[in-house]
């Protein structure tokens, strides 16, 4: 999985915090188990679910870090993995159809909630190795997007 050094460090920090939270959840689960009947023990169930969720999160982060291929952050005008981009949907007359949205262009994912535009998305495929400009996505009904690379900062 390609990621910038900054992304690698962010995931490493999240992994460290998740491992600490996991230990706390295990401790809470053991305490709740000692309270007796597990079938009617809401504290135990909450702790058990937290342990399960954290275990999955930790596994994913460890896998991502183990397979990480660090790519350099660049100042070129081309869209590459790790680029920060501003995307504005355009009306047919070329005027903005909404607010400008900022995304990180990434090898995986395609989510508005996490502000990630994946290279496998329709727009991601259209802009890959391109430069700032207007891109038409035909399989979305011919929607135009103004895509601009942010050279510095996020």
Image: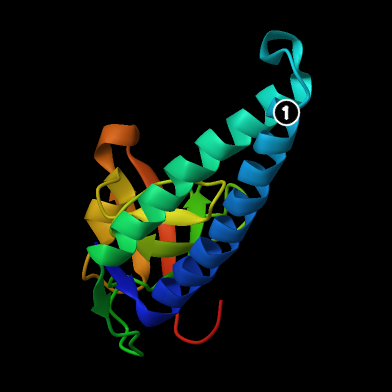
What is the quadrant of the C terminus in the image?
bottom right
Residue furthest top as drawn? 39
Q: Secondary structure at mark 1?
A: loop
In the image, residue 143 sits, relative to residue 118, either above or below, namely above
Q: Mark 1 = which residue?
A: 34
Q: Residue at x 60, y 52 (%)?
A: 23
In the image, residue 108 sits, relative to residue 41, either above or below, namely below
Between residues 70 and 12, which one lies in front from this camera angle? 12
Q: Residue 109: percent from the left, percent from the top? A: 37, 48
Between residues 74 and 64, which one lies in front from this camera angle? 64
In terms of image quadrants, where is residue 76? bottom left
Q: How is the image coloured?
A: rainbow
In terms of image quadrants, where is residue 37? top right
Residue 92 in sight from this viewpoint: no
Q: Residue at x 21, y 70 (%)?
A: 129
In the image, residue 22 sits, relative to residue 31, either above or below, namely below
Number of marks in picture: 1
Q: Residue 73: percent from the left, percent from the top? A: 35, 84
Q: Residue at x 39, y 73 (%)?
A: 8
């Amino acid at each position: 999985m390609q990621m910038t050094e900054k992304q690698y460090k962010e995931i490493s920090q999240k992994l460290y915090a998740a491992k600490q939270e996991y230990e706390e959840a295990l401790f809470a689960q053991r305490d709740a188990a000692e309270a007796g009947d597990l079938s009617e023990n809401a504290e135990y169930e909450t702790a058990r679910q937290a342990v399960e969720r954290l275990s999955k999160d930790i596994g994913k982060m460890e896998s991502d870090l183990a397979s990480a291929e660090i790519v350099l952050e660049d100042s070129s005008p081309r869209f590459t993995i790790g680029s920060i981009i501003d995307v504005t949907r355009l009306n047919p007359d070329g005027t903005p159809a909404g607010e400008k949205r900022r995304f990180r262009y990434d090898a995986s994912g395609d989510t508005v909630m996490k502000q990630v535009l994946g290279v496998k998305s329709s727009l991601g495929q259209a802009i890959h190795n391109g430069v700032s400009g207007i891109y038409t996505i035909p399989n979305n009904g011919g929607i135009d997007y103004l895509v601009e690379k942010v050279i510095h900062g996020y």
